[in-house]
């Protein structure tokens, strides 16, 4: 079976846990060299160890994408360690700012918008600059079905940040396809991560809740999310530009 990303170099932000880790592992299994980036070294090292245990090549890069200098450095260090940058996946994000809009703390609003939106913008900005100067490539951003597709009471800050991620991704896709940079996004609904688990909720309680909350009757797996990312990054999606692939079991159908 051919490996779609053999000899390709991939940068995954938020690669220490959850969807980001699954994406990094999936790319490595398909032959890519992978840089996993995030603010905390421990989880990144664990992702690298999992990849290397399967015979893949990976490197951990610590950095904060809300800082433009760090976002640029992550691109530069990916190239230094892996010899190139062909694909970037911007997964770093937080699920915060809970509460009615009038009650959202301003500092928490700034944090959610800063990480989810500004972090995605800065990461893309520097990734695009490298890719267009080096023959092009692909970028996949992670948004959410909450935002453009759905609003949920008490999640105004998160919805605003992710709706804006969708908008800036599609704008960038139009702006830079002529530069050889193909940009798309995945908008997951409930996926089997801590982000979709309520405080104190057991696995059994969550599974029961999802039977009613999701038409398909369950949460998605991180592997299903990773498969969507890899498709959009692959040559199989070569005619796909600015697409928003909703992955939510029918919640927003």
Image (cartoon, rainbow, N blue to C red):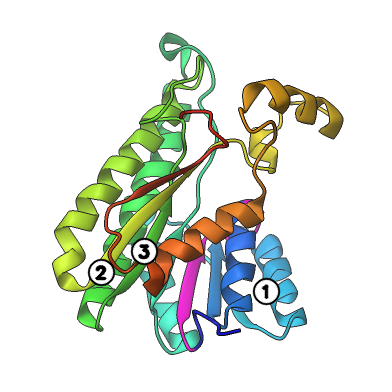
- The quadrant holding residue 208 is top right
Marks 2 and 1, the one that precedes in the sequence: 1
Q: CA distance from mark 2 to mark 1?
A: 27 Å
Q: Which mark is residue 139?
A: 3
Asked whether residue 89 is drawn in magenta, I would say no
* Magenta part of the chain: 7-18
Relative image position of residue 78 (x, y in whole percent)? 45, 78
Q: Earlier in the sequence, mark 3 or mark 2?
A: 3
Q: Nearer the viewer, residue 16 or 169?
A: 169
Q: 168 or 63: which is nearer to us?
A: 168
From the viewer's perspective, is residue 211 above or below residue 162? above
Q: Is residue 186 visible?
A: yes
Residue topped by disc 1: 48
Q: Relative to residue 248, is residue 78 drawn left or right? A: left
Q: Position of residue 42 (x, y in %)?
A: 71, 63
> Which quadrant of the rendered structure holds the N terminus?
bottom right
* CA separation in Å, label 3 and label 1: 21 Å
Callout 2 crowding tier (Cα within 10 Å): few <14, some 14–19, many ≥20:
many
Q: Nearer the viewer, mark 3 or mark 1?
A: 3
Q: Is residue 65 above or below residue 235?
A: above
State the residue position of label 2.
Answer: 181
172 up-or-down from 248: above or below? below
Q: Please give the name of the residue rendered at 52% of the width and 15% of the height, measured from the top-left corner.
A: 99
**Residue 72: % across, % down:** 35, 68
């Amino acid at each position: 079976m051919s490996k779609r990303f053999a000899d390709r170099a991939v940068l995954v932000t938020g690669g220490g846990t959850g969807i980001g880790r699954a994406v990094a592992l999936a790319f490595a299994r398909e032959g890519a060299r992978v840089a996993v980036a995030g603010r905390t070294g421990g989880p990144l090292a664990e992702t690298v160890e999992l990849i290397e245990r399967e015979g893949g090549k990976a490197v951990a890069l610590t950095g904060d994408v809300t800082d433009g200098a760090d976002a640029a450095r992550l691109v530069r260090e990916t190239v230094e360690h892996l010899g190139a940058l062909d694909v970037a996946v911007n997964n770093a994000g937080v699920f915060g700012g809970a509460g009615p809009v009038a009650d959202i703390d301003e500092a928490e609003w700034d944090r959610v918008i800063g990480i989810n939106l500004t972090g995605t913008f800065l990461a893309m900005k520097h990734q695009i600059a490298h890719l267009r100067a080096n023959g092009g490539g692909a970028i996949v951003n992670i948004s959410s079905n909450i935002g453009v597709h759905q609003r949920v009471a008490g999640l105004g800050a998160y919805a605003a940040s992710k709706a804006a991620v969708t908008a800036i991704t599609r704008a960038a896709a139009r702006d830079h396809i002529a530069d050889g940079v193909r940009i798309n996004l995945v908008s997951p609904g409930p996926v089997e991560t801590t982000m979709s688990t309520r405080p104190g909720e057991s696995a059994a309680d969550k599974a029961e809740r999802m039977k009613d909350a999701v038409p398909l009757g369950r949460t998605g797996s991180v592997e299903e999310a990773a498969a969507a990312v890899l498709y959009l990054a692959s040559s199989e999606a070569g005619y796909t530009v600015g697409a928003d692939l909703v992955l939510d079991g029918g919640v927003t159908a």
